Image (cartoon, grey):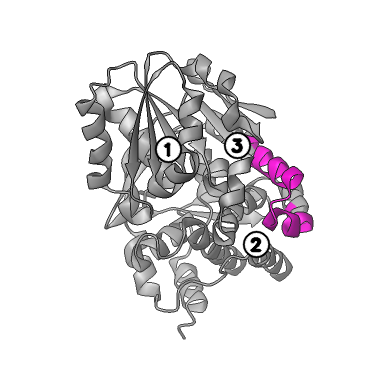
Amino acid sequence: MQQLKVELGERSYPIFVGQGLLERPELVRPYIRGRQVCIIADDCVAALYMQKVRALFDGFDVDQVVLPTGEAYKNWSTLQQIFDRLLEQRHDRKTTLVALGGGVIGDMTGFAAACYQRGVDFIQIPTTLLSQVDSSVGGKTGINHPAGKNMIGAFYQPRLVLIDTATLNTLPQREVSAGLAEIIKYGLIQDALFLDWLEQRMPQLRALDAEAITEAISRSCAIKAQIVAADEREGDIRAILNLGHTFGHAIEAHQGYGSWLHGEAVGAGMVMALEMSRQLGWLIDAQFERGRSVIAAAGLPVTPPENMRPDDFLRLMAVDKKVLDGKLRLVLLRDLGRAVVTAEFDHSILQSTLQKMTHES
């Protein structure tokens, strides 16, 4: 088992990474401050792991909420089901919510914890590769709105992140690839040596080789923990974690949430960011091709949906969270391993990038 820490003063918390951690109650019990626990999962994950996770909390008053599966249900009406259960069962201010599942469940559980009685504890137990390396760490919580992804939410940190890599063995290959998108992101934005490592080990990572995947998760979480500790509420450097996401969120909103997996949309979005960085003269052709190739090697799409046009992107990107004072900010690359967040770019370059990537002459 590897242990990391997100350094946020009195709100600091550990990240445990390893195999078989769902069978180690001693890791979670010190982080429960009351007698009530409510485990929240979707119906797919509940069928696989609910009983095992309930056993982690033997001796507590354990409740559960099982929600429908998929990004399409990351909305107000589904969130309300969590509040309904907590109120029906009279959960108090010392209750602990447990997010068992992928990013959708983690985001909604965290948002519910931030809101219920103005804030209760929660624990992240992510079961998808994407949630293990990204959404479970850092305290971003929320739900989608038809007009934009994750536009309603709160920054609210968990008490603990417990990552059992054995849960990855039940993932479809498409979900594995989606998680690899976020891992590749860390190499592109901040750690060129990690990018080298990923290029060399992509076949092992796609095959979920235990040693390789544990190392990739740990290195990804370490990078994210460092960035979150420096900028918890995304006022500055934390925004670099959104490489490809502005383009990717537009894809998700246009196609309908859940049609493209988040990681798939981010994969294509990162290629679009690479292309725009190349057109700005910040990357040379060889660097663009290298970035594109590692994304493709992960089994991810490298072009946006065929039915999207430049105007679709511009309309949907206009409601992105990174729009400030009416200016769209994008995460781009000055070099492989060196990301910047900027609103100071020639918008004709953005238009040219969109036209090229959507094959619109």
Left or right: residue 250 compared with residue 357? left
Vertical arrangement, residue 98 with respect to residue 149, above or below: above
Calculate the distance from the C-alpha at mark 3 to the C-alpha at mark 1.
Answer: 21 Å
Which label lies toward us, 1 or 2?
Answer: 2
Where is residue 127? Give x, y as percent. Answer: 53, 43
Q: What residue did someone put label 1 on?
A: 140
Q: Is residue 309 left or right of residue 349?
A: left
Element type at mark 2: loop
Q: Cα distance, mark 1 to mark 2?
A: 26 Å
The residue that appears at 58% across and 18% down in the rendered structure is 26
Q: Which residue is mark 2?
A: 298
- Relative to 94, does residue 251 appear above or below in the rendering? below
Check disc 3 and report the residue beneath it.
164
Observer-side mark, 3 or 1, equals: 3
Image quadrant occupied by the N terminus: top right
Identify the magenta region. Answer: 198-222
| Image quadrant where residue 226 sits | top right
Regarding residue 154, the answer to whether it shows in the image is: no
